[in-house]
């Protein structure tokens, strides 16, 4: 059903390049707006799982992702309306540089698919460009002119000057912005960096960083309140989004009668990657969704399906191995045929070992942490029927890891996915057997709700007959 209620206005926080300070500015802006009395909906462009955790702390509500590559451009507006429902304002943090996204040499579009620019255009929202002012002077005007005119479908509504060196430096930069007609919406002085400790894939997730993450968000909030023009940013915010609101119940279809199967989702410090819509879809499909922490918990009573999402199990391998009772439970469920959906960290947890520490031994492979980062979108096809996907179904997923497996195959398992990397060589990845679907590939459930319907149906069948 199409709603006539207007969508929440938005500002998109972008930058010319990575490392300009988007996350500090966006998180601080969310916190400062919240403290000023706004109900703020935070979003992150792309498949990032870490920044939304900090956004969520600042906003007091879940951080969500907007990724046209993973879910399709047609779902961005409905997902935005869903995530910002009842809010006064949305803050959307971009990814990389403003026009950066999926690499496609054949594309003729000025903005890459999945870029911040594409999402801003889909939302009809203005962009606030965060500029790392170090090394900039009058020539900043030329940079801003280029960004303002490069893609006519994107409107840059203002600039935030970050890491400004002195009052004189700020004056010169403001004059440069005036030359191209862009208002300055904030000037953040250069100071001891407000940094959350980083790890090999970016920031340490907020759920792991605990009280220090809260303190960091508080510091970002104070910084934004002191140095950003909040009234001007609020006045700039707008959105051209209309049409339907994303509805998980409509996505999964009618729920079968009968008891709700218990689906256990791994959480805690080792399993922090995931999408808010995943839990919503599972619940809409009829599951009783319960979170457990593999570092110290057992499975919830009556568990008939398990979701093991991404995260950093390599940082917690000793503690995960010490919870041997849970590892046994997972192994027994897998043997009995229960549906188990394991992505990236989940795959490592199902392996025989991780950096020499015993894991669940569901999949007979050994995993280890290394120096090589595997990163990028994958256009994949399911090559084996599973509890989630039928053979032949196509998805766009994302890889994001520094671990690797000693072998690409395991006895008794068929591959989950096939794709062609950028060099054209065919690849097979992942493991499928019985109810187990384990892979490095992250998918966004909102892009494939039928997979959630299928998974919950398998859990219901296992609960009844397993």
Image (cartoon, helix red, strand yellow):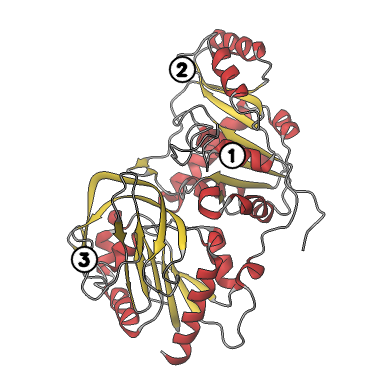
Secondary structure under tag 2 reads loop
CA neighbours of label 3 inside 10 A, class few (<14), some (14 to 19), many (20+): many
Report, in whole angstroms, how far the alpha carbon at label 3 lies from the one at label 2: 47 Å
From the viewer's perspective, tell me whether residue 32 is left or right of residue 387: right
Crowd rating for badge 2 (residues with CA inside 10 Å; few <14, some 14–19, many 20+): some
Q: CA distance from mark 1 to mark 2?
A: 27 Å
**Which of the two labelled residues, at mark 1 and mark 2, occupies the earlier sequence position?**
1
User: Residue 458, position in %: x, y?
Assistant: 47, 80
Q: Is residue 287 visible?
A: yes
Q: Position of residue 262 (x, y in %)?
A: 49, 79
Residue 464 badge: none
Question: In front: mark 3 or mark 1?
Answer: 1
Q: Measuring 65% from the left and 54% from the top, which residue is drawn there?
A: 83
Query: Which image quarter is the C terminus in?
Result: bottom left
Vertical comparison of 386 with 111: above or below: below
Q: Residue 27, located in which quarter of the rendered image?
A: top right
Viewer-closest of 290 and 20? 20
Residue 274 locus on image (x, y percent)? 47, 58
Q: Earlier in the sequence, mark 3 or mark 2?
A: 2
> To which residue does mark 2 refer?
134
Q: Please state which of residues 309 and 114 is positioned toward the viewer in this rendering.
A: 114
Q: Residue at x 46, y 38 (%)?
A: 106
Residue 262 vertical placement versus 466 (above, below): above
Q: Residue at coordinates 33% horizontally, 79% vertically from top-left?
A: 334
Please identify the residue farthest to the right as the structure is shown: 4
Q: Earlier in the sequence, mark 3 or mark 1?
A: 1
Q: Which residue is mark 1?
A: 118
* Residue drawn at the location 44% of the way across and 92% of the way down: 465
Residue ID for mark 3: 365
Q: Pick the residue in front: 123 or 345.
A: 123
């Amino acid at each position: 059903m199409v709603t006539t209620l207007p969508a929440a206005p938005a500002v998109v926080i972008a930058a010319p390049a990575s490392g300009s300070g988007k996350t500090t500015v966006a998180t601080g802006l969310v916190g400062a707006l919240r403290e000023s009395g706004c109900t703020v909906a935070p979003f992150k462009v792309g498949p990032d799982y870490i920044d939304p955790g900090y956004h969520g702390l600042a906003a007091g509500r879940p951080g969500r992702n907007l990724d046209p590559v993973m879910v399709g451009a047609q779902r961005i507006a409905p997902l935005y309306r869903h995530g910002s429902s009842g809010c006064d304002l949305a803050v959307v943090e971009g990814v990389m540089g403003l026009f950066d996204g999926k690499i496609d040499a054949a594309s003729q579009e000025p903005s890459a698919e999945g870029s911040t620019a594409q999402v801003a255009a889909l939302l009809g929202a203005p962009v606030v460009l965060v500029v790392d002012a170090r090394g900039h002077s009058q020539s900043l005007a030329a940079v801003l002119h280029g960004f303002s005119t490069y893609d006519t479908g994107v409107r840059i509504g203002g600039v935030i000057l970050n890491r400004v060196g002195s009052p004189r430096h700020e004056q010169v930069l403001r004059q440069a912005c005036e030359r191209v007609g862009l208002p300055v919406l904030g000037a953040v002085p250069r100071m001891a960096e407000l940094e959350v400790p980083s790890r090999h894939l970016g920031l340490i997730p907020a759920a792991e960083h605990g009280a220090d993450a809260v303190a960091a968000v508080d510091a970002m909030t104070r910084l934004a309140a002191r140095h950003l023009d909040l009234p001007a940013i609020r006045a700039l915010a707008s959105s051209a989004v209309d049409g339907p609101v994303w509805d998980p119940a409509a996505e999964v279809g009618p729920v079968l009668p009968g008891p709700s199967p218990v689906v256990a989702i791994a959480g805690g410090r080792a399993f922090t990657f995931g999408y808010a819509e995943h839990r919503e879809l599972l619940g809409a499909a009829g599951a009783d969704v319960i979170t457990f922490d593999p570092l110290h918990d057992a499975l919830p009573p009556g568990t008939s399906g398990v979701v093991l999402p991404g995260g950093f199990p390599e940082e917690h391998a000793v503690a995960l191995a010490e919870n041997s009772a849970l590892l046994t439970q997972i192994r027994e469920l897998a043997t009995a045929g229960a549906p188990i959906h394991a992505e990236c960290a989940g795959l490592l947890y199902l392996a025989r070992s991780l950096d020499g520490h015993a894991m669940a031994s569901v999949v007979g492979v050994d995993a280890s942490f290394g120096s090589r980062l595997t990163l990028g979108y994958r256009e994949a096809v399911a090559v084996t029927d599973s509890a989630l996907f039928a053979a032949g179904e196509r998805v766009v997923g994302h890889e994001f890891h520094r671990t690797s497996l000693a072998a690409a195959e395991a006895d008794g398992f068929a591959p989950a996915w096939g794709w062609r990397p950028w060099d054209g060589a065919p690849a097979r990845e992942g493991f499928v057997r019985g109810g187990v679907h384990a892979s490095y590939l992250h998918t966004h459930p909102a892009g494939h709700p039928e997979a959630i319907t299928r998974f919950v149906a398998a859990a219901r069948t296992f609960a009844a007959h397993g």
